[in-house]
Image (cartoon, rainbow, N blue to C red):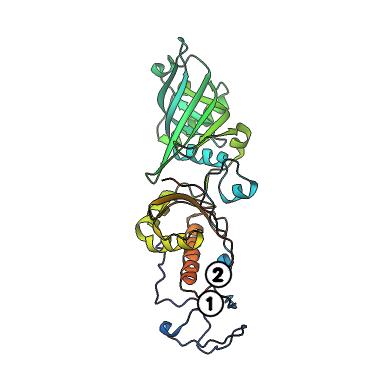
Amino acid sequence: MLPQIRSLSPRYVPSILPPATTSHFSTSKLISFSTTLSSIKPFAKNTKVSLSKNNPCLNLSIKPLKCSVSVIPEPTQIDLQKKPSPAEVARTIIELSSVGTLSTLTSEGWPLGIGVRFAVDSNGTPIFCLNSSDRRFLLDRKSSLHVQFEQSGTRTTQCTLQGSLDKPEDRAALKKFHSIWERRFGEEVDADLIYVVSVEKIFQKEDFKEDGIWVDSSEYKIANPDPLRDSAKNIVNEINTNQTEDFERICSVYVDSDLKVTHAKAIWVDRLGLDVHIHFERAMFEVRIPFPREVTDEKGAKSSFNCMSQLAWEVEKSYTIPEFEKGKLLKQIR
């Protein structure tokens, strides 16, 4: 069971407000606060506030990163720091999947694809168990493995690995591949049936209508699968099911638009942030909302979401003045 993300309500008094005994700010305008929320007045637009050091969320989000569009033709180095690289995305897709389409050329020169199960080693090398029926079609060593992974029923990320289909001869390698297959599928396999694809290059796509990106095999092999991959689906479902109000508030604050957010849906989450579809009246955009800092596990992702939710609530109520440049909407879906 996922930990519940606390929803902030008007009954909650943000930690940036001073205690009841404090009545002085380092500004030209003095404001007195009572202990009840009803008597709290929003700060003037140019008022500067001394934030409390006791609030861990504010330490993360005083100057949060703003959203950026998830698909950019030629991403810069800064953009890559806000979103996993294509090599990391490909490794994540391969790790999360166990079924794909293996294609080679037949003796007649026609390409033929067959559905296969596969496991992967620590370098992302696909491992197959091919019976005699499968092997009679695979006459050319040049092959490709195509893998797709659906995200939130909205986007289908995919990658195609190209390389040579080989039968390992080294006994130590065969033993290792046998062990990997057994852990993945919980079944014994004849070592004579094990094949692997020596990956030479990878073609990665964010979705069916997107342009693909070629990835070098050396970059693919050293890339790490995303640490949130096994919990990402549950985190996204929790946000879309139980945290819709908080999430729409986050989108309103972290996205630069004069239009009102009518609906927001989280598509995927990774160590660097969230991929989101946002509806503005009749238009829908795909947006990238980065976390204030990189996370390494589900707990860190939940904590970042809570902090972003609190800051968004404080900005909405004018208790906090946002001091950051908002990201721009560049990609309209419809």
Q: Which residue is mark 1?
A: 16
- Residue depicted at 42% across the width and 61% down the height: 260
- Residue 177 picture location, percent across and down: 51, 30
Asked if residue 215 lies left or right of residue 284, the reply is right
Mark 1 and mark 2: Cα distance apart in space = 9 Å
- Residue depicted at 46% across the width and 30% down the height: 146
Residue 268 makes an appearance in the image: no
Q: Amino acid at mark 2?
A: Leu
User: Depth check: 295 or 327 in front?
Assistant: 327
User: Depth check: 204 or 297 in front?
Assistant: 204
Q: Which residue is mark 2?
A: 58
Q: Secondary structure at mark 2?
A: helix
Q: Earlier in the sequence, mark 1 or mark 2?
A: 1
Residue at the extreme left of the image, as rendered: 241
- Residue depicted at 56% across the width and 40% down the height: 86
Q: Secondary structure at mark 1?
A: loop
Asked whether the residues under the numbered discs 1 and 2 touch, taking CB atoms below 8 Å apart as contact, a structural biologist would say yes
User: Depth check: 324 or 148 in front?
Assistant: 324
- Residue 59 picture location, percent across and down: 58, 68
Total marks placed: 2
User: Depth check: 82 or 66 in front?
Assistant: 66
> Tag 2: Cα neighbours inside 10 Å, few (<14), some, or many (≥20)?
some
- Residue 173 picture location, percent across and down: 56, 28
